[in-house]
Image (cartoon, rainbow, N blue to C red):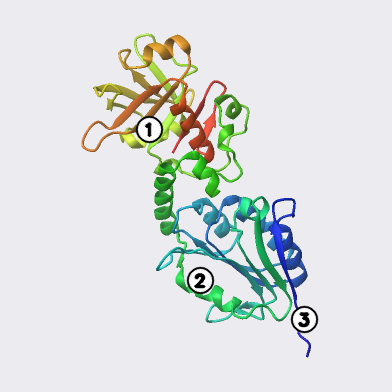
Amino acid sequence: MTTRVSQRVVTSGAGQGDLLTAIRDDLRAARPRAVGIASAYVTVSGVEAIIPVLRRAKVAVCRLVAGIDDHITHPEALRRGIAFGWEVRMARSPQGRFHPKLIVGGARFDADDAMLDPVFLYLGSGNLTGPGLQVNTESAVVARDDGLIAGAPEAFATFWRLAEPATPDAIKQYSALFAERSRQRRPEVLEALGVSESRRVAEASSAKLRAQPRPRITTVSQLFATTAWTGLESFTGEYAFQVEFPRAAGEVVARLARAGRQKTVDVQCEDTNVRKMTFRFYRDNGMFRLNVPNNVPGVDWARLNHDGVAVVSRGPEGGASLRLQILRPGPKVDDLLARSYALSSWGRTSTRVYGWF
């Protein structure tokens, strides 16, 4: 019997189309019932891009192995896959890094987790991310029908057995590590790694963010944030500088301060002095309010100019609950905006932009 095989090298970027189109076309032609995906990095945009491709190809079963060694895979991407009915596992390599980019399609998975009757193969450089599949300059081998590269089904089975199930607790633990690593990376590094999806951090000015819709999904949950910030274009209070935090950012502050609806908290200011401040939630406007004494560095300038940013972060170990800085426009504010923009951890009201990370 003659073996049929369609096998080609495809490229993306540089005017050469994209990998997602090649995957879509060959999957629809091959019509596998089951697909296994192993990818070093997985993002929300990658999952959202591949879901309609699998749906059109009438794929019934999908298994995803996502690498988490470098803390680039988005926790929300794992949740999205699970919500769509995928079986999802998280992989760390016992040595080096977990770094494959492999898709295998066939009839079904056997008892040893290998793909039976394989009819589709993607083996390339592009990860399961929006940029990897549609923007970056990448290359891959895409093959379908009989006679696929020997060992491909077994390779996926090896990755699957190496990985651990993405349970809610496992994703929660990984989310905390992901948030911590993201805080340590420069915004331009988040962009280069694809964590920022297709967002260009250079676009993160206050004016541009106020003109954009708020992100649907944040990369860093408020549960794992250690810093919250809000613009000072508007405020209230004459005897105290009453800084209003919109609810999402205010809940970060409340958690860091371990505060209920109203509490006096110790706050270390930029002059190293610790001051007691009232932190309270107001139901009428859904805002949290921090009453900042007038002698805190930066208050006079912010009052006069209706500008700048208030930044609240976790206090020093064994010291005050919170730290507070009032920043004038400049490189530090630019970094705040770019970081939250890269991580989709920002929002806006009619008067200000705010965020957390």
Q: Quick check: 120 left or right of 244?
A: right
Front residue (pair 140, 261): 140
Residue located beneath label 3 in the image: 4
Residue located beneath label 2 in the image: 159
Q: From the viewer's perspective, is residue 233 above or below residue 15?
A: above
On residue 253, the disc is 1
Q: Secondary structure at mark 1?
A: helix
Q: Quick check: 252 left or right of 106?
A: left
Q: Quick check: 160 left or right of 7?
A: left
Name the mark nearer the viewer: 3 or 1. Answer: 3
Quarter that holds the C terminus = top left
What distance separates the C-alpha of mark 2 from that of mark 1?
A: 41 Å
What distance separates the C-alpha of mark 3 from that of mark 2?
A: 27 Å
Disc 3 residue type (three-letter): Arg
Q: Is residue 283 visible?
A: no
Mark nearer the N terminus (2 vs 1): 2
- Asked whether the beta carbons under mark 3 and mark 1 sit within 8 Å of each other, the answer is no
Disc 2 residue type (three-letter): Phe
Picture residue at 49% right of the left edge, 36% below the top? 340
The spot of residue 334 in percent (x, y) is 49, 29
Quarter that holds the N terminus = bottom right
Picture residue at 46% right of the left edge, 58% below the top? 68
